[in-house]
Image (cartoon, rainbow, N blue to C red):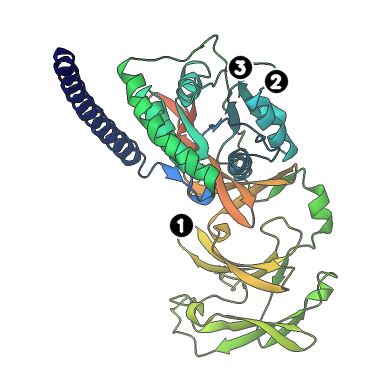
């Protein structure tokens, strides 16, 4: 009987403890769930406006930090996270959004080397080895971002990984004094992607645990300098110069200025033997405005010029450019007896260094002239109106190297200030790379200020003051 009573008491106490343990586990689970929700919310909120998936919209930084991952899965297939990060890094570099690449990953033993695997793939895609730096001690995301700042001396950086990873890396970077944005590699679908994203929730909680306990990277070490490239800008010239472009120039016909005074057909094969099309200019004429006493027209003659340009092949119309909305574009450049000169003309010239002549027409002149450009597409044998910026720059020099074209331009100025730009021509688009600003307004010195495409100052040269 006594044994039965003792057993009953024991079971009662045990049941009570089990109930208490269940409550404690439930409370801890709820607390952890709240921590996951809060951590996820804070990290996601912090990253709004700081990650980019479109390379054309991504800001420019000197260094892109690629977060390492394993190359091959256990089944021997290439890891999609690895491949997508390599592709994203190449896109950024090709678009000149980054100058150097810092590959940070785990190299914990001789048989596991994330940084070297990534570097080898980047080199295969055509990125020069001297533009790639390796961080073999990027064991965790925390290590990678802190070492980018403390070892590789970076103050701002573009992190390259999948979006969910970038968001966490940006938060960690900013908490350790590193300004960061993220460029998003393509996500991975399927079970692998789901498992990784589930682990990400726990990793985000770990971020705050590490911050609370002030966790540092496993290794730091000696500083490693990643250089900053500043271009040597040419001075202003009325003549366009070329460097390293001989091969393209040898295939490019000479620039031609067209004098159109009536309905006219131009056989382009007589200008470029590769072309088998004709351009038909439809002339538009109405009475001119009144002249002043000098015989000079009071306003730009916006009622005389070309109404359309038709592209013909074998006598058949294959494309038409309508100029009705910009009829003030003139078809010729003429010098009047009193020295007055029309500022508008039609030219055939190669603006994007692909060896084919494009159509250029001056649209208007204020402090400087702007142009409308129709770029020739050899695949369709038509001219396509370009909104890629070519009409708003004044070229002074083309540099061709390693299948890349760098265009130096003059953006305007006076004796006290002037601005030059350097653009890479990528997929028939001008992509700003660097700018040079000359400032002579200061009292004691003149300055040359060099900036990247995001407006960050790369270098400031102090010059002896000149009297102007």
Using residue 243 as the reference point, say whether residue 221 is left or right of it.
left
Label 1 SS: loop
Residue 157 in picture, x, y percent from top left:
48, 31
Using residue 225 as the reference point, say whether residue 256 is left or right of it.
right
Is residue 106 positioned above or below 310 on the image? above
Disc 1/disc 3 C-alpha distance (Å): 61 Å
Report the residue at 71% width, 55% height from top. Answer: 353
Q: Which residue is mark 3?
A: 108
Camera-nearest residue between 464 and 291: 464
Camera-nearest residue between 155 and 283: 155
Disc 2/disc 1 C-alpha distance (Å): 63 Å
Residue 41 lies in quadrant: top left
The mark lying in front, picked from 1 and 3, is 3
Residue 102 in picture, x, y percent from top left:
58, 27
Residue 6 lies in quadrant: top left
Residue 419 in picture, x, y percent from top left:
49, 43
Camera-nearest residue between 45 and 404: 45
Is residue 70 positioned above or below 286 on the image? above
Q: Earlier in the sequence, mark 1 or mark 3?
A: 3
Residue 284 in picture, x, y percent from top left:
57, 88
Q: Which residue is mark 2?
A: 111
Q: Which residue is mark 1?
A: 367
Callout 1 crowding tier (Cα within 10 Å): few <14, some 14–19, many ≥20: few
Placement of the C terminus among the 4 image quadrants: top left
């Amino acid at each position: 009987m006594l044994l039965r009573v003792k057993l009953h008491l024991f079971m009662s106490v045990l049941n009570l403890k089990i109930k208490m343990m269940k409550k404690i586990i439930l409370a801890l689970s709820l607390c952890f769930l709240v921590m996951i929700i809060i951590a996820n919310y804070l990290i996601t909120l912090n990253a709004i406006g700081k990650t980019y998936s479109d390379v054309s919209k991504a800001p420019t930084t000197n260094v892109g930090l690629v977060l390492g991952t394993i190359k091959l899965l256990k089944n021997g297939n290439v890891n999609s996270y690895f491949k997508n990060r390599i592709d994203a890094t190449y896109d950024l570099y090709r678009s000149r959004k980054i100058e150097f690449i810092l590959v940070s990953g785990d190299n914990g033993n001789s048989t596991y080397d994330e940084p070297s695997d990534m570097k080898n793939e980047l080199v295969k895609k055509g990125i020069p080895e001297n533009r790639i730096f390796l961080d073999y001690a990027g064991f965790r995301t925390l290590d990678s971002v802190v070492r980018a700042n403390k070892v590789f001396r970076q103050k701002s950086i573009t992190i390259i990984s999948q979006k969910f990873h970038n968001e966490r890396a940006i938060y960690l970077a900013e908490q350790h004094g590193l300004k960061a944005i993220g460029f998003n590699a393509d996500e991975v679908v399927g079970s692998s992607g789901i498992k990784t994203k589930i682990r990400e929730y726990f990793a985000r909680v770990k971020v705050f645990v590490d911050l609370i306990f002030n966790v540092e990277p496993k290794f730091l070490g000696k500083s490693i300098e990643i250089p900053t490239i500043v271009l040597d800008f040419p001075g202003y010239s009325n003549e366009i110069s070329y460097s390293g472009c001989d091969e393209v120039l040898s295939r490019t016909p000479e620039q031609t200025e067209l004098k159109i005074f009536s309905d006219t057909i131009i056989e382009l094969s007589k200008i470029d033997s590769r072309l088998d099309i004709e351009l038909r200019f439809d002339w538009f004429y109405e009475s001119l405005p009144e002249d002043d006493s000098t015989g000079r027209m009071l306003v730009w003659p916006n009622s005389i010029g070309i109404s359309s340009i038709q592209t013909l092949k074998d006598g058949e119309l294959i494309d038409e450019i309508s100029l009705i909305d910009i009829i003030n574009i003139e078809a010729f450049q003429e010098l009047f007896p009193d020295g007055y000169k029309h500022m508008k003309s039609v030219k055939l010239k190669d603006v994007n260094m692909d060896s084919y002549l494009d159509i250029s027409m001056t649209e208007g002149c204020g402090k400087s002239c702007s142009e409308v450009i129709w770029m020739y597409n050899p695949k369709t044998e038509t001219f396509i109106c370009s909104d890629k910026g070519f009409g708003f720059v004044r070229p002074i020099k083309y540099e061709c190297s390693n299948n890349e074209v760098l265009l130096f331009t003059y953006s305007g100025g006076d004796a006290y200030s002037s601005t030059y730009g350097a653009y890479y021509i990528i997929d028939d688009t001008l992509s700003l790379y660097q700018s040079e600003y000359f400032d002579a307004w200061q009292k004691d010195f003149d300055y040359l200020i060099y900036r990247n495409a995001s407006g960050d100052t790369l270098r400031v040269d102090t010059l002896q003051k000149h009297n102007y």
